[in-house]
Image (tube, grey):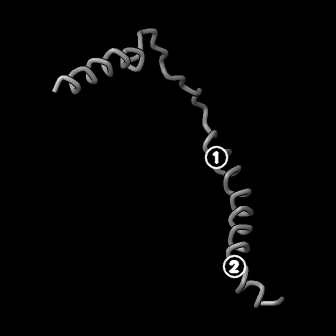
Amino acid sequence: MNWSVLRKEWGAVTFVLTVLVGMIVVPLALYFTNQGPAAIAAPPVTTTASPIASSAATASSAATATSAR
């Protein structure tokens, strides 16, 4: 094995090794995370209006307050 190639291309070698390790670790982590008898709990869905929808009125009143100075 030519060690000068590894000295020049250590970043590429590190990247390839990281990808190979990730190809093993990520599926194992997903497999072991989903082990268990508990059902997946979905977050409750709210039907009220979000505060983002009313931010347009707040922005215009803030702009009016700053322009009056």
Q: Nearer the viewer, residue 14 or 41?
A: 14
Displayed quadrant of residue 16: bottom right
Q: Nearer the viewer, residue 17 or 30?
A: 17
In primary-sequence order, the first of circles 2 and 1 is: 2
The residue identified by callout 1 is: 32
- Assess disc 2: are there few (<14), some (14-19) or many (≥20) residues with their C-alpha within 10 Å of its C-alpha: few
Q: Position of residue 26 (x, y in %)?
A: 67, 52
At x 67% / y 74%, what residue is drawn?
Answer: 11
- The quarter of the rendered structure image containing the N terminus is bottom right
Q: Position of residue 29 (x, y in %)?
A: 64, 50
- The quarter of the rendered structure image containing the C terminus is top left
At x 54% / y 25%, what residue is drawn?
Answer: 41
- Tag 2 secondary structure: helix
At x 36% / y 19%, what residue is drawn?
Answer: 55
- Tag 1 secondary structure: helix
Q: Position of residue 23 (x, y in %)?
A: 73, 56
- Assess disc 1: are there few (<14), some (14-19) or many (≥20) residues with their C-alpha within 10 Å of its C-alpha: few
Q: Position of residue 39 (x, y in %)?
A: 59, 26
Q: Nearer the viewer, residue 5 or 27?
A: 5
Q: Which mark is residue 10?
A: 2
Q: Mark 2 belongs to which amino acid? A: Trp
Q: Is 7 located above or below residue 33 in the figure?
A: below
Q: Mark 1 belongs to which amino acid? A: Phe
Tell which tag, 2 or 1, sits nearer the viewer. 2
Q: Which mark is residue 3?
A: none
Residue farthest right in this picture: 1
At x 40% / y 20%, what residue is drawn?
Answer: 52
| In the displayed structure image, the side of residue 49 where residue 60 appears, left or right | left
Q: Is 48 located above or below residue 66 in the figure?
A: above
| In the displayed structure image, the side of residue 2 where residue 34 appears, left or right | left
In space, the residues marked 2 and 1 are separated at their CA atoms by 32 Å
